[in-house]
Image (cartoon, rainbow, N blue to C red):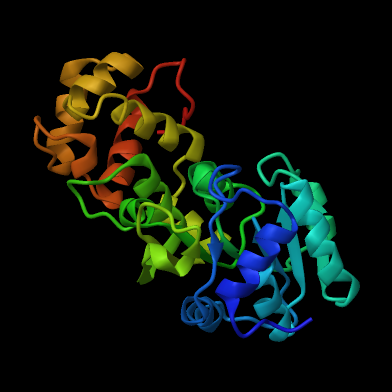
């Protein structure tokens, strides 16, 4: 099956045919802009040798575009009606596997099997991601054990801005992105590119994930569980100063914290959202030796 020339008319026809109520169920907003679609495909660095995971495949517009480039696609779709519709595409393509499932509940093992991954193999993620799962999805695929090589995602523009924020507007999600990948906003996408149009702008975001060696170099021996425990404590109350959050959440003494802050040049009245990744890493390293037995990383 080839990609239809009029995506908007084709989408509306299928919505009527399958009696769908997009926008009200599972946050569905189907992409109907061919130029946006072309931009996604252009930056995805597709290769027949590298399988692609697509999430929230909807009516298959992006799926068909990927298949036209001879990509081997595993499409994960939660909606039972849409999964059945995608199966009709699968019948005509040996390169498409459709899984009716919740991507957040699908195990790494099942994903590996579906993608046909062996030790050392890489894969990509290309998706018009449902807004509702973007945070949980990013946490899993940026920091989990089955990280892709590249992700190209259509995300809510607000989320894209958080991922690429500068010190002063940093969040835990920003920190997670900084520590996992090179992140770039490719293009802002207007609501008119979707049917039905959402109420907000979207963005094409490209992630080039760091290799295991690069991540090890970045964290330079810092236990990642300890790092994220520290970061979550720091962001526990955004309006409060970082020092107060760490003192309260992790039971550090104020003198110990002030001594470490002085060593790495952090002002006493700095908030978590104002630190760079390097400052967070310095803080985690210096506080290792100050952590009590209830904390995670005993290495000093």
Which residue shows up at 66% across the image and 59% down it? 15
Which residue shows up at 44% across the image and 58% down it? 197
Where is 8 relative to 6, above or below?
A: above
The answer to whether 250 appears left or right of 208 in the picture is left
Q: Quadrant of residue 183?
A: bottom left
Q: Quadrant of residue 97?
A: bottom right
x and y percentages locating residue 163 in the rendered image: 36, 54
The answer, for residue 58, to whether it is visible in the render is: no
Which residue shows up at 36% across the image and 40% down it? 172
x and y percentages locating residue 74 in the rendered image: 76, 64
* Residue closest to the eye, 265 or 179: 179
The answer to whether 14 appears left or right of 88 in the picture is left
x and y percentages locating residue 145 in the rendered image: 65, 49
Image quarter where the C terminus lies is top left
The answer, for residue 261, to whether it is visible in the render is: yes
* Residue closest to the eye, 55 or 171: 55
Where is 185 relative to 280, above or below?
A: below
Which residue shows up at 17% across the image and 34% down it? 271
Image quarter where the N terminus lies is bottom right
Tally the numbered discs.
Answer: 0
* Residue closest to the eye, 4 or 187: 4
* Residue closest to the eye, 133 or 251: 133
Where is 272 relative to 148, above or below?
A: above
x and y percentages locating residue 60 in the rendered image: 69, 67
Q: Quadrant of residue 193?
A: bottom left
């Amino acid at each position: 099956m080839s990609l239809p020339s009029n995506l908007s008319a084709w989408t509306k026809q299928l919505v009527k045919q399958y009696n769908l109520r997009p926008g009200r169920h599972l946050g569905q907003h189907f992409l109907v802009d061919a130029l946006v679609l072309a931009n996604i495909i252009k930056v995805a660095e597709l290769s027949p040798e590298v399988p692609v995971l697509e999430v929230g495949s909807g009516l298959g517009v992006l799926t068909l575009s990927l298949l036209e480039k001879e990509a081997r696609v595993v499409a994960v779709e939660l909606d039972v009606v849409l999964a059945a519709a995608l199966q009709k595409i699968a019948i005509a393509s040996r390169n498409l596997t459709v899984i009716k499932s919740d991507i957040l509940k699908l195990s790494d093992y099942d994903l590996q099997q579906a993608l046909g991954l062996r030790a050392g193999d890489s894969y990509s993620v290309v998706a018009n991601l449902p807004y509702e799962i973007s945070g949980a999805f990013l946490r899993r695929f940026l920091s989990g054990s089955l990280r892709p090589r590249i992700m190209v995602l259509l995300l809510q523009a607000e989320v894209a801005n958080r991922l690429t924020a500068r010190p002063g507007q940093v969040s835990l999600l920003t920190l997670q992105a900084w520590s996992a990948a090179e992140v770039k906003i490719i293009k802002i996408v207007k609501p008119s590119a979707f049917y039905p149009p959402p109420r907000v702008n979207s963005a094409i975001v490209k992630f080039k994930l760091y290799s295991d060696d690069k991540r090890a170099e970045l964290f330079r021996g810092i236990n990642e569980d300890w790092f994220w425990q520290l970061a979550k404590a720091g962001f526990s109350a955004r309006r409060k100063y970082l020092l107060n959050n760490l003192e309260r959440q992790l039971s550090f003494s104020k003198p110990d914290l002030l001594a470490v802050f002085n060593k790495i040049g952090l002002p006493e009245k700095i908030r978590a959202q104002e630190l760079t990744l390097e400052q967070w890493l310095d803080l985690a390293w210096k506080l290792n030796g100050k952590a009590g037995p209830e904390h995670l990383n005993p290495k000093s």
